[in-house]
Image (tube, rainbow, N blue to C red):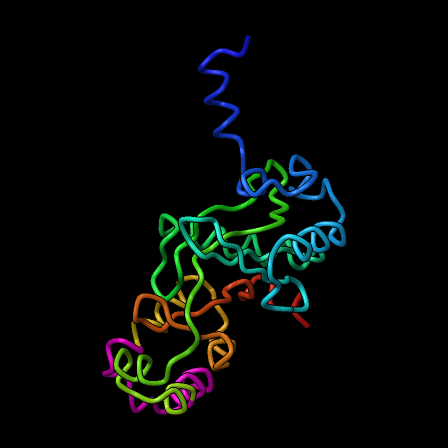
Amino acid sequence: MKSFSGFLIEEKSKTIIHKLKWPDADNFTGGEMSFRKKIAIAKEHSKKIGNGSARDSFEIDTKTHVTVMKIAKNVKGFRQNLAEVNLYEKYNLKPPFMAPMIEYDSNKDADIAWILVHKALKFDEGTFYRYFDVPFKEFRQTLSAIINNEDDKHKKNKKIQEFVKFCKKNKLVLGEMRQRSNWMTYENKPIIIDAGVNKLNQWDAI
């Protein structure tokens, strides 16, 4: 007979993959299962909402939250997932300018097959403007000026400087933040949805 403590340990070891009752859940981790099979299972049991060179994104309703799972589809995807997990861990899974993380594929090899975060809403120009006090077009120009060491007319804008500081502290690539597709809205604030490419792995993205 299974002891109560044994039951608790077993329950704690179950991932969102197990709770969703996806097939072969025990092997949906690290390199235990092929990239192709993981993506195929996710496509069959959830809604694909994003396609990148290294990761695909899927919308998953966990009953308590609507979430997004980013699944690696090659070794670059492992590295990008690891980069995001390392960043999230620094901020107790709730970094500024990002939607909170719920769970990730924790394994001894650090080949992180998937990460699960809260789903954000689509980009909203009005929300962006109210937060940063500039339209997105001007925000992009400001980041370009900073990247090129040119005069930054918004150097007294505390929100922009706070964001730039966050990026530099975490070795994020400012150039990536000029893409509107990397911005969405979460709890009435603008957030970035991809921090997987940083200065340590940016050449992987080419």
Which stretch appears magenta? 141-160
Seen in the picture, residue 156 relative to 192 is either above or below; the reply is below
In-image side of 7 versus 40 (left or right)? left
Along the line of sight, which residue is nearer the eye, 114 or 84?
A: 114
The residue sitting at the top extreme is 1
Query: Residue at the spot x=42%, y=86% of the render?
Result: 140
Q: Any magenta on residue 154? A: yes
Q: Quadrant of residue 33?
A: top right
Residue 148 place in picture, x, y as percent: 46, 87
Seen in the picture, residue 94 relative to 126 is either above or below; the reply is above
In-image side of 117 versus 158 (left or right)? right
In-image side of 94 versus 85 (left or right)? left
Residue 80 place in picture, x, y as percent: 59, 59
Q: Quadrant of residue 126?
A: bottom left
Q: Any magenta on residue 12? A: no
Query: Residue at the spot x=34%, y=72% of the render?
Result: 163
